[in-house]
Structures are given as structure tokens and as C-alpha cells.
Image (cartoon, helix red, strand yellow):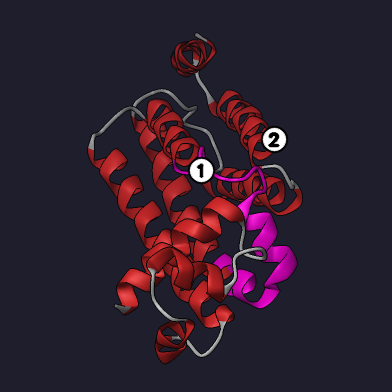
């Protein structure tokens, strides 16, 4: 039952927003009493923590699946971006990260420290792979570019209210990041990926 509550709460939080979903809403959706929810979760904040942890796990599972497909480094980044777009397409147009930061800053900070570690590792591996494939320049300072990119991405998500706007700016950031690192071969691959989005 606990897992079912977390799954339903996650779905509702992403769809309607962390602030607007109440324990009553979750109970009503699941046809259970609010008392049942409180048996497992002492308050909404604990449920939000568990829900964000579940979503975080799902996101990283899908990312691992994409990475296992062994696309080239630039294609891989575009596939990951597409995955995020699909995940949030049926939701209200308020960025979940922005909402968490605004309404539940402590939960947000906990997620952020873990997320920065995960993303740093992911970005580093992607850049190293791109260098091996000849898509990114071999003279890059990998650690600096990793820092540049996650600073850009986290800044966009923390400060953009609209999810669709955040995704639009993120695409610009991905293009900016890729062009800064790309060899001639990398620019060709980037143009190919951008053309797929614009068609």
C-alpha cells in the first residue's frame, strides 16, 4: 500500500503541482481514507520526499537505459532531453524543480546535492565519450565544461517558472554547450539532431 500511495502521489505532484495537491486529493484518487495515508506518512513533506526519491530513481533508470543503447555522445544528450520532455508533457506548465525550490526548500536542497553528484558524473562520462568519438575537441578541460553545463542547467530549472519555457531554454543551453566543445564532425552531428527536432 505504501508503494501505491507514493506512486499515485508522484503522479499527482508532477501533474498538478506539489503545492496544490492535498492529502485529500491523493486519498480521493485512490479511493482510500486520509487516515490510511497518515498511517504511512506523518505529513505531506515526508510523502513529497518519498515521491521525489521515486521519480529521481525512475529518471536515472531511463537515463541508464538510454546510455546502454550506445548512441554517440551528442545523440545521447538529445535522447535524454527527449525523455525529460515526454515525462513532463502531460503536466501543468509549472516546473517541478521551481515549485520544490519555492515551496519546499529543504527537500529541494537534499535532492540538489545528490543530483549534482549524479549529473556531474553523467556529464563527465558524456564529454569523455565525445572526445573518444572525435565529436568533442581533445584539448577540453573536462572538469570546467562539466561545471559550466550543470551550472547552466540548474540555473534554468531553479529560476524558470514555466516547464515549457525551461525546456526551450534547456535546448538552447544544450546547443550552446555542444557547439563550445564540438569538432567539425561534432557540429555535423549537432545539426543533424537539431534538424530532427525542428521537423
> Residue 32, labelled with which disc?
none
Real-space CA distance between mark 1 and mark 2, rounded to the nearest whole angstrom: 12 Å
Give residue 55's position: percent from left, percent from top.
Answer: 42, 60
Name which of mark 1 and mark 2 comes first in the sequence: 1
Q: Which residues are magenta?
A: 87-112
Report the front residue among 23 and 194: 23
Classify residue 79 by image quadrant: top left
Give residue 111's position: percent from left, percent from top.
Answer: 54, 68
Give residue 196's position: percent from left, percent from top.
Answer: 45, 13
> Residue 165, labelled with which disc?
2
Magenta-span inclusion, residue 95: yes
Please tell me which residue is depicted at 56% across the width and 42% down the height of the picture. 141
Q: Does residue 153 sit above or below 48 in this rendering?
A: above
Q: Does residue 58 sit above or below 134 in this rendering?
A: below
Please tell me which residue is depicted at 57% across the width and 79% down the height of the picture. 44
Q: Quadrant of the N terminus?
A: bottom left
1 vs 2, front mark: 1
Residue bearing the label numbered 1: 88
Report the front residue among 186 and 160: 160
Please tell me which residue is depicted at 23% across the width and 41% down the height of the picture. 68
Q: Is residue 112 left or right of residue 70?
A: right
Question: In terms of secondary structure, where does tag 1 sit?
Answer: loop
Determine crowd level at label 2: few under 14, some 14-19, many 20+ residues with C-alpha closer than 10 A. some
Q: Is residue 170 left or right of residue 121?
A: right
Classify residue 185 by image quadrant: top left
Determine crowd level at label 1: few under 14, some 14-19, many 20+ residues with C-alpha closer than 10 A. some
Dominant secondary structure, magenta: helix
Amino acid at each position: 500500500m505504501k508503494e501505491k500511495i507514493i506512486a499515485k502521489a508522484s503522479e499527482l505532484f508532477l501533474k498538478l503541482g506539489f503545492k496544490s495537491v492535498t492529502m485529500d486529493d491523493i486519498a480521493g484518487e485512490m479511493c482510500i481514507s486520509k487516515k490510511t495515508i497518515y498511517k504511512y506518512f506523518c505529513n505531506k513533506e515526508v510523502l513529497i520526499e518519498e515521491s521525489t526519491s521515486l521519480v529521481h530513481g525512475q529518471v536515472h533508470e531511463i537515463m541508464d537505459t538510454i546510455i546502454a543503447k550506445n548512441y554517440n555522445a551528442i545523440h545521447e544528450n538529445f535522447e535524454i532531453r527527449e525523455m525529460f520532455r515526454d515525462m513532463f508533457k502531460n503536466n501543468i506548465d509549472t516546473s517541478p524543480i521551481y515549485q520544490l525550490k519555492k515551496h519546499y526548500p529543504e527537500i529541494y536542497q537534499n535532492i540538489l546535492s545528490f543530483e549534482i553528484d549524479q549529473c556531474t558524473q553523467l556529464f563527465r562520462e558524456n564529454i569523455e565519450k565525445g572526445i573518444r568519438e572525435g565529436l568533442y575537441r581533445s584539448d577540453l578541460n573536462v572538469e570546467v565544461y562539466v561545471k559550466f553545463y550543470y551550472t547552466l542547467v540548474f540555473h534554468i530549472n531553479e529560476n524558470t517558472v514555466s516547464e515549457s519555457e525551461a525546456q526551450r531554454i534547456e535546448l538552447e543551453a544544450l546547443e550552446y554547450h555542444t557547439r563550445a566543445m564540438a569538432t567539425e564532425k561534432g557540429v555535423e552531428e549537432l545539426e543533424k539532431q537539431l534538424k530532427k527536432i525542428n521537423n
